[in-house]
Structure formats: C-alpha cells, structure tokens
C-alpha cells in the first residue's frame, strides 16, 4: 500500500513530519497549499505518517534502552573521576560532581531573587537605633571593666598568698 505513494507525495509528508507548515512546503515545492493538505489528509498520506511515527517511537525506545544499559558504566566512570586517588584534573572532578548533583535534583538555582527594596526610617527611629547601640556598647564596656577588675583582684589575692 505504501509503495503506491508517489515520491513527490512522500516528500510532502516527510517535510510535514519534520515540522514544516503547509505554506512552507507549498512554497518550497512550488505547489498549492490545497495540494499539500490533500496529500496529508489522504488515506495513503495518513498511513505513511503513521509508519513514520511508529519508526520514530521504535527508534526512541531503542535509544532509551541503550542509555539504560550504559547507566552502570557511566556510574563507574563518575566514581572513577571522583576518586581522590585518581589523577583526574580538579576541573574534571568539579564538573563531574556538579553534573551528578544537577541530575539528581540538587541543582543550584539559575537565578537568585534578592529583595532590594529600600526601607526608609524617620529621624526618630534612626536616633532610637543609635541610642540602643550606644547603650549596648556601654553595657559591654562596663561588663569588660568588671571582668578585668575581678581578674586583677584574683591575681592580687594569688600574689599575696
């Protein structure tokens, strides 16, 4: 049945299957869009598209199977590259580790959102913050003085014994 399809019609269907729009196919092949649509809607055209789709799915499944069979070897390669006893360059080890983390869901965000809104405060609020800081500094200084006096006293007592 598919052998009955003319080469010109197969060309139209393959272009459509590859993502070309009817107008683009018509322009390239110098035919009307009605002809393109007619070929694509014909029973032979639909059958040919189904055959292409089936072949694409089979190929995709074969590729996936091949990738799955390579998983063990790939993991061994990653382990070898990350082994500290191995002489792999640091950049290779870094990129390997980064790739593994990316693939397992630990990828760093591509973009950080930082809130850069400016908060304005009144002069009274700023003065209150400054006073609170001064009080905190004074309390720390008094505490240091008391600690130093206690240490001096203890040293004197040790010296007199």
Image (tube, grey):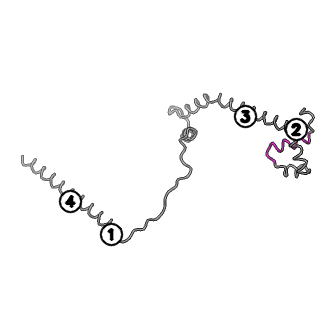
Q: Which residue is mark 4?
A: 142
Residue 146 vertical placement versus 81 (above, below): below
Q: Is residue 134 left or right of residue 26?
A: left
Name the residue rendered at 20%, 59% in the picture.
142
Determine whether label 1 and label 2 are within 8 Å by CB: no
Q: Position of residue 79 (x, y in %)?
A: 55, 31
Name the residue rendered at 90%, 41% in the picture.
9
Determine whether label 2 and label 3 are within 8 Å by CB: no
Q: Position of residue 95 (x, y in %)?
A: 57, 41
Nearest the eye: 39 or 86: 39
Q: Which residue is mark 2?
A: 43
Mark 1 or 2: in front is: 2
Nearest the eye: 58 or 50: 50
Give neighbour class at mark 1: few <14, some 14-19, many 20+ (Cα, 10 Å).
Answer: few
Q: Which mark is residue 127?
A: 1
Mark 4 or 3: in front is: 3
Mark 2 or 4: in front is: 2
Question: Does the stretch in magenta take in 14?
Answer: yes
């Amino acid at each position: 049945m598919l052998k009955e399809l003319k080469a010109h019609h197969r060309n139209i269907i393959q272009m459509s299957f590859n993502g070309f729009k009817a107008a683009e196919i018509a322009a390239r092949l110098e035919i009307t869009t009605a002809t393109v649509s007619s070929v694509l809607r014909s029973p032979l055209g639909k059958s040919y598209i189904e055959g292409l789709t089936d072949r694409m799915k089979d190929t995709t499944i074969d590729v996936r199977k091949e990738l799955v069979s390579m998983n063990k070897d790939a993991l061994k390669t990653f382990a070898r590259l990350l082994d500290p006893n191995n002489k792999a360059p640091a950049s290779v080890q870094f990129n390997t580790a980064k790739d593994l983390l990316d693939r397992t869901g630990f990828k760093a965000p591509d973009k950080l959102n930082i809130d850069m809104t400016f908060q304005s405060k009144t002069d009274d609020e700023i003065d209150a913050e400054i006073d609170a800081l001064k009080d905190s500094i004074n309390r720390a200084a008094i505490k240091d003085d008391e600690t130093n006096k206690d240490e001096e006293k203890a040293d004197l007592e040790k010296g007199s014994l």
